[in-house]
Image (cartoon, grey):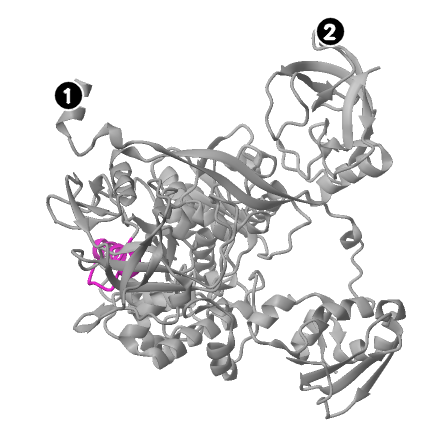
Amino acid sequence: MTKYFGVAIDDIFNSMAERFRPEGAADVDVKVGYDIREFGKRKLVISNRKMSLEKTDDLSDCNAVIKTDERTFVGVTVGKIETMEAIIALKFRVKGDQGVLALLPRLFLKLSTQEKDVKQEQELLVLKKVISVKQKFATGPVMGKFLKGLKEEKVLAIKCPECGRLQSPPREVCAICRVKNTEWVEVGPEGELRMLEYCYYASPDPLTGETRETPYGAIGVLLDKCKDEEVFWHLLNPAHLDRVKMGIVLGEKVIKGTRLRPVWSENRTGSINDIKYFEIAE
Amino acid sequence: MRSNAMKKEKDFDINNCYTISGKLALPYTYFAGRTGSTFITHIRDNKKIMGVRCNHCNKVFIPPRQTCEKCLSMISDNWVELENQGEILNYTVVRYDDNHLPRKAPFILAMIKLGKADTPVIHIVEGISINDVKEGLKVKAVFAEKTTNTILDIDHFEPV
Amino acid sequence: MGHRKKNRNVGIVGIGETKFSSHREDVNQPEMINEAVRDALNDAGLSIDDVECVVHGNMELFEMIHQPDLWHTLGTGAYGKDAYRLTTGGTTGGTLVAAADNLVASGMYDVVLAIGFEKLQEGHTTGGITNMADPLWARKLQSGALTDSAAVKVIAEFGEERAKRAAMTYRIIMDKHACLNPNSHRAFGLDWDQMDDLIKNSPPLIGNLRLIHMCSQSDGACAMIFASEEKAKSITDKPVWVRDHICIHREETLNLCNNYYPNQTTHKFAAEKLYERNGITDPVEYFDVFEMYDPSAWWGMDWIRDFFLLKDDEHIKLIENKDIMIDGKIPINPSGGVIAANPIGATAMVRVAEAAKQIRGNAGPHQIPRQVNHALASSFGGTMWTILFMLEKELNW
């Protein structure tokens, strides 16, 4: 029998009876199926604080079926493979009641591996904290003018006197030509969707400490009067996420994107929140 | 002249400048490591303050660390028990309030030499007026009732 | 391009790496760094007294500690020595190598220790990256290093089916390499027959970018010792020579989500300049290995074309024909790359370290089974900053 991480899969199943913790099975009534490539199928039944394990091909009445391969199963059981990573790589799947995964550690003692590392048993202290520091950000004259424009429902862009490119939000200097940007142009406020980041994952916003609801959409809109890469970065109405189409220009290929318009906030203070988000312009 | 330069650049109008409030708020985790954990758990559970010795440099360090910073030898097995009392080498009085500070102002922070240790430990001193505290004062550790797995498992030091 | 010839040659004489993982609760930061430092000193056969200058770096504030180099003297051995701290985002590791290279080449120091590290489990990675963005506008919109733009571009050019398969092929190749590297953080053991399943079912992050494509968040440290030509030859019989390096930044406005126009990416620009001044006309032919900083499978796949100055779909073909595998024509990331292990402050340095190990011939199970004489390593950070390094086995230029 092959050993992975010093353990054979038989060691795990054969020791389940002696590692079972009836006290953890107080109100548990569940059938867990194991479908392990190379090894075969097993059904674990927990009921009335008792467990039984049988070899069977029929897992149809199981609350959950764990589908994996021998190496991954051993690795996850002895803690050498991270369950989450195995799930991401689709090497470890739970069909049915996902809650079963959290349940199993309660029901069985850990398998004692051959590597007895006394050091591992030391208590290692971990401190969790949230740092929160108040800050004030200066707008400067250029960003300040732009943000003030938003208060008046205007989107302003600054123009480079040499290459003519527009930047919104504006920068003081055109970094390509290395000259001061001087002229202001009012653009949009409507435009064409050029980029959509359909975000399923959100991280805490350092400015508020809060995490956005997902899914949400961060977009690049090519506002009227802007061209090429002069897209405006903002958010999309989450309700329209699946209805919009991205415009694309790739060499000769040109596909037009959905037409969007900004939804202005009631209470505008001269900040990015003055535009609530963009939505489909019907 | 500066004001003329500002007037010339009409579009860079200083009246367009203002400030926006925000914050920096992010979660984080700190791992004490084996050596650090041993140090704190001894304080927390056994009411003992431990240091480590570097045999090569013949110095005892507190807080304990895994390597001697001078000769880079591994010293985390050479635990030395230190006395729970010592003397103040130097001190300061903190006179302002902030969320991260452990006490309300004014309070005393002192560098305390505990017996055999070659490095002082910094901690709060209570039980003496801020006008009376001085170098050389003998103080002893008072351990915390409610522990937090931090250095504040020693609650403070007070005069012997 | 203002870049003088080196005053003298610089060799890599010691390399140390910790195992990259997400479970280093047993060490605090200086202790983790110390592991890599010891490793490097042992590798070179030097003691800390032989080191004249220490260059230290990580991504600032990622572990919520400012200027950690002060605290880390407990582990870096910088006590009483000249020391520098550098932090340049994702390219930190590369900047550290470039700085150490310059310090030794200039004649100011003979032996320099460069240390890059990160303990990402102690911080919040995406939050930290978002924190670098402009607070008045971008910070609210940014999603860290996660973006769908690379995938959208590649799909628009080559079609959804081919693009997705190529990206997943790249990913599986990187994983196979990672399985050979004992230091890598994540090695899933992916198989070719999982390709369709992964393409369809792996949890998505943003658009077409899926969790499986994205790099890991690891804890780890890397230390490298650089010495002047004369010293290097006396310290070790296998010094790896740093032939040249180039750093290119491009000021990106907030609009980097739409670079489908024929603008010059920093990768292409850096590669063109580097090859031009070193007389390299066919990079795929010249280099024996390329350790690329590939934060995601989509980017990695896309950048091969820029770094090797290829055309059309030549880079996709390299992937489809598996030429980039360890036993292939032009092995890329035999260590598994950034997708396998990403302790950000160290990652760019690890690319150079791994390339150097390949040249030495003692990288371990993931050693390329051929003589490696010329290596290329890249760093990436921020908004498309690039550093490219050329390493050589012999002083032959």
Residue type for callout 1: Asn
Measure how far apart labels 2 and 1 are at the Cα level: 58 Å
Left or right: residue C163 compared with residue A93: left
Compare residues C256 and B104 and report the one nearer the observer.
B104
Determine the residue positioned at 69% across, 84% down: A35
Does A95 sit above or below residue A189?
below
Q: Position of residue C37 (x, y in %)?
A: 56, 44
As drawn, the label of residue B112 is none
Name the chief secondary structure element in magenta.
helix
Dot 2, crowdedness within 10 Å: few (<14), some or many (≥20)?
Answer: few
Q: What's the amino acid at mark 2?
A: Asp
Tell which subunit mark 2 falls on.
B
C171 drawn magenta: no
User: Considering depth in this image, is B112 or A258 the residue closer to the camera?
Assistant: A258
Q: Which residues are magenta?
A: C255-277
x, y percent for residue B154: 78, 29
Q: Position of residue C48 (x, y in %)?
A: 56, 37
Where does label 1 land, which residue? B4
